[in-house]
Amino acid sequence: MTMLTPTEAARLILEHIAPLPAVRRSLREALDLVLAEDVASPIDLPPWDNSAMDGYAARSGDVAGASPERKVVLAVVESVAAGQFPARPIGPGQATRIFTGAPLPAGADTVVRQEDTEGGGPDRVTVVTGRDARKNVRYRGEDIRKGEIVLPAGTPLGPAQLGVLASIAQGAPLVHRAPRVAFMGSGDEIVDLDRSAEILAGKKIATSNSYTLHALIRRAGGIPVDLGLARDTKDSLREHLGAARDADLLVTTAGVSVGEHDFVREVLAELGCDMKLWRIRMRPGAPLGFGLLDRTPVDRVAGQPGQHDGDVRAVRAPGDPAAAGPPAPVPAYRAGVRGRADHPRPQTAALPAGGGPTRGSGRWARGALDGSPGFRHPDVHGPRQRPPDRARGPGRGVHRRDAHRPAARRSTPRG
């Protein structure tokens, strides 16, 4: 089986993942789900010309020449608040008292802000500057036109997108249901936190991967299904893997190396899993696999915390959340480092990961942008076993060093 690059592996995974069934969900249940159809607006938004200020609706021809030396007095014909509609048009020399959001009366093309006027009683207003001529009006359809596609199929629904749908009265969008993502770890040395005494005594290892995967799945919009920890026996692995047949995706960690007790690949084969991928050209994190168990996609990642976190971020990212919508473009993975506040623009660097990389594979490392002012280099953190959360700072993440590019260097501090 040919080893692929992370980008090639992501592309192969997407080729074998189909969108999940579409269902109607209320907006309060649709957060982080993915649209299954284009949404066109049935209305203009705003639905009418309206005021952007509290003030007076008027004709620009009447107020454009106003100044403290040449004040303009207008007759106020009515008052219109938000939620009301004007009953009278305005003519030359007239104005309507108006409040933010209220519809403009016919004949008006200007709203003079309240602070640019002087009161002259309930039926008159004095305008002292013409700076607002043809201003402070929000026109019909300015934000959204009727019939316009406001959200295309494949759009993940975040808070802003839900607000847009509510604004055009689309209360039950058609979305792909959230994927059920089963995950499990394996290993006789691994225990959950209910056995913390053994962990603290150095007798067992905490199942940190389970908590990382649970969080990654939730953040990607999936529903985590924890299958627990399998022992290093074929019977235990069969029992745990068999419980995943109703899931939309299965993720396994550990048990994928070449040791005498690493049975995951063998048991998957016995269960009929068609493995499309078993290793990738990525170090650390090479033991990453993908296959199909019946019709359930199976991702298997390395057991080392730093490796499996990198595998998920580097290869699973384009397909998250578990084919909930149309495939996303496969990104070209580079060492993009998000800068600190003093370096707000993204920085690009090739990272030193130590040693000579296998030709064409590239080296990957966790790192964060150095916190010293004036420095634009990533601080690469420790050996591959080091947990990813030890790489602290806003620029932390998993970064690639291309196989034939020089390592990043510290720049000269700015004076």
Image (tube, grey):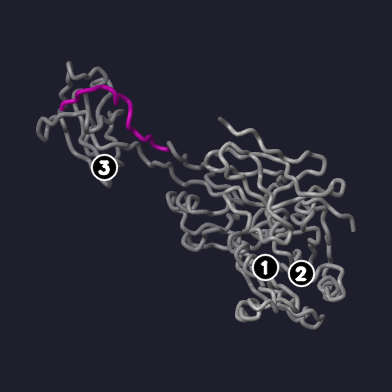
User: Which quarter of the picture shows residue 79?
Assistant: top left
Position of residue 124 in the picture relative to residue 15 (left or right)? left
Position of residue 90 in the picture relative to residue 310 (left or right)? left
In percent of width and height, residue 21 lies at: 64, 63
Label 2 to label 1, Cα distance in Å? 9 Å
In the image as oriented, which residue stretches furthest toward the left? 121
Q: Compared to 241, does 346 lie above or below? A: above
Q: Which residues are magenta?
A: 126-141
Q: Compared to 254, does 175 lie above or below? A: above
Question: Dot 1 corresponds to which residue?
Answer: 209
Circles 2 and 1: CB distance less than 8 Å? yes
Point out which mark residue 254 bears: 2
Residue at figure coordinates x 23%, y 21% from the top left: 62
Circles 3 and 1: CB distance less than 8 Å? no
In percent of width and height, residue 54 lies at: 25, 37
Circles 2 and 3: CB distance less than 8 Å? no
**Residue type at mark 3?**
Phe
| 155 is within the stretch colored magenta | no
* Comes first in the chain, label 3 or label 1: 3
Q: Give the camera-side residue of 371 and 279.
A: 371
Q: Describe the element under mark 1 as helix, strand or loop.
A: helix
User: Nearer the viewer's eye, disc 2 or disc 3?
Assistant: 2
- For label 1, the crowd category at 10 Å Cα-Cα, with few meaning under 14, some 14 to 19 and many 20 or more, is many
Q: Compared to 177, does 127 lie above or below? A: above
Q: Describe the element under mark 2 as helix, strand or loop.
A: loop
Residue at figure coordinates x 75%, y 41% from the top left: 407
Question: Dot 3 corresponds to which residue?
Answer: 85
Label 3 to label 1, Cα distance in Å? 60 Å
